[in-house]
Image (cartoon, grey):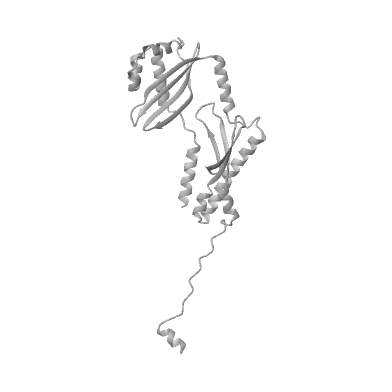
Amino acid sequence: MPRILLFLLTLLLAGCALPKVDPEREAQTDRAYAMVRSNDVTAIKADATPVLRQQDLTGPVSLMRSHVHPGEPTSARTLSWTMNTVNGIAAYEIVRLYSHPEGAIQVKAIMARSGDGPWQIDGLHVVRVTPETLEAYDASIEAARFSLTDKSPVHYLMLVAAGLSVAFCLVSAVVAGWRRRWLWMIGCLFGLGQVSVNWATGALAVHPIYVALLGAGFLKGLGATDPWIISVSLPLPAILFWALGKWRPKPPKAKPEAGPTSGPDARWADT
């Protein structure tokens, strides 16, 4: 049973790690953007889904190319990305920002694949980004960063409560495992209900019906402008574990009482 605790903690650590964008999808977006810049409709169709391949892309590619700056891009970065799978069809959407000497270009590429097949371009959107928009976006990224400066008492209270909840759940689970109370050990790893705070805005949200691992959550969306969400749940199983005295050693099992002796020796003893 201690292995179960180790397994659950491993899952928790894996879940806390933020997923990263697929570098191959970034490279595929870069290639698609280069095809648009060179007006290579044939190459775009070769990398497109069958539905997109059947369409006349000459006009759309020419229109997108009209938004592109003539100079070569000096740098590129991913702004956001999402991935989902429905009925065996996976969709990957990625937004990349390309910096040119003349300005910035934003490219949104939508890719799809069926099963284990190759990723194919299912949509492209190219638009110029004004300096004002870029400044506002950078300000949003800065606001979404996790920082302890200029925060309200509610921010600090939620952060301390989340840390205490995690510590309380872990200590309770370890003690329950030490006392060989396996069901209590598993129960102590969870909290009930949830109160969360948007770390960027300070907005609070309450979810009465909720089950959280280790009684707290530290979440951030995939986008660079997505804020951190700090949540706290009531570690009710751990509280009951201590309140009901389950942390004490189990009482020793009662030994069976010896019954009346039978046999020849017993008869001689009675005479």
Q: Residue at x 44, y 84 (%)?
A: 266
Is there any visible trace of residue 38 in the rendered image?
Answer: no
x, y percentage for residue 188?
Answer: 54, 49
x, y percentage for residue 80?
Answer: 48, 25
The answer to whether residue 191 is left or right of residue 118 is: right
Number of on-image labels = 0
Please tell me in which quadrant of the rendered image residue 51 appears. Answer: top left
x, y percentage for residue 44?
Answer: 36, 17
Q: Residue at x 46, y 87 (%)?
A: 270
Please tell me in which quadrant of the rendered image residue 38 appears. Answer: top left
As drawn, 67 above or below 268: above
Is there any visible trace of residue 218 in the rendered image?
Answer: yes
As drawn, 11 above or below 58: below
Residue extending farthest to the bottom is 271
For this rendering, which residue is in front, 24 or 209? 209
Q: Residue at x 46, y 30 (%)?
A: 20
For this rendering, which residue is in front, 186 or 11? 186
For this rendering, which residue is in front, 143 or 51? 51
Q: Residue at x 57, y 38 (%)?
A: 231
Residue extending farthest to the right is 153
As drawn, 245 above or below 117: below
